[in-house]
Image: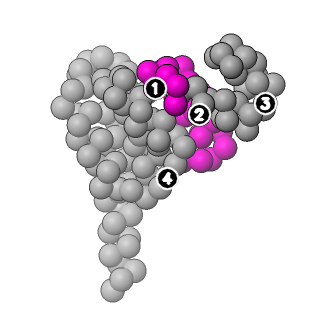
Amino acid sequence: MDIDEITSMLEAGDDNAARHHLLDLVKRDPACEVAWLFLVGIGFRSDDAELSLWALRALEKLRPRDVLVASGLVDSLLRLKRYEEAKEVIHAFSKIACLGMPAHDTVLEEHRRALQFINDSVEAAGDEDE
């Protein structure tokens, strides 16, 4: 099945069938960015953070400087409470971000808030342990 047919399934709201065909497609063609992006979207739409994370990790290899990938990775990792990994992504993106580029500045600000959330969560968990 080609990407246009899968797109039609998604437009019709048939996420389950589209997911099945997209998984087949990325097995055959792991460089198909559109398929990975659709899987990210299905993951977010269905609240399947593991699916989104898996697809975003694949996209990270194909688009290492992509702001949307960096943003999505951090969001997925936060939803899964994988804070150390989120910090690693934030740190890696901060090293390649282009200050003054609006999209990069926006993601850097998101990441600053994510770090604050992580710190607050870790602190709150520490308070509960006492």
First along the sequence among labels 3 and 4: 3
102 in relation to 16, above or below: above
Nearest the camera: 80 or 102? 80
User: Which residue is at 58% across, 26% downward?
Assistant: 25
The residues bearing labels 1 and 3 have C-alpha atoms spaced at a distance of 24 Å
Residues rendered magenta in the picture: 27-49
Q: Earlier in the sequence, mark 4 or mark 1?
A: 1
Is 100 magenta? The answer is no
Q: Which residue is mark 2?
A: 23
Percent coordinates x, y for residue 83 in the rendering: 35, 56
Q: Earlier in the sequence, mark 2 or mark 1?
A: 2
Q: CA distance from mark 4 to mark 1?
A: 25 Å
Q: Earlier in the sequence, mark 1 or mark 3?
A: 3
User: What amino acid type should be assigned to the residue bearing mark 4?
Assistant: Arg
* Residue at the image point whose x is 66% and y is 43% from the top: 46
Chief SS of the magenta region? helix
Would residue 41 be counted in the magenta stretch?
yes
Q: Residue 77 shows which numbered tag?
A: none
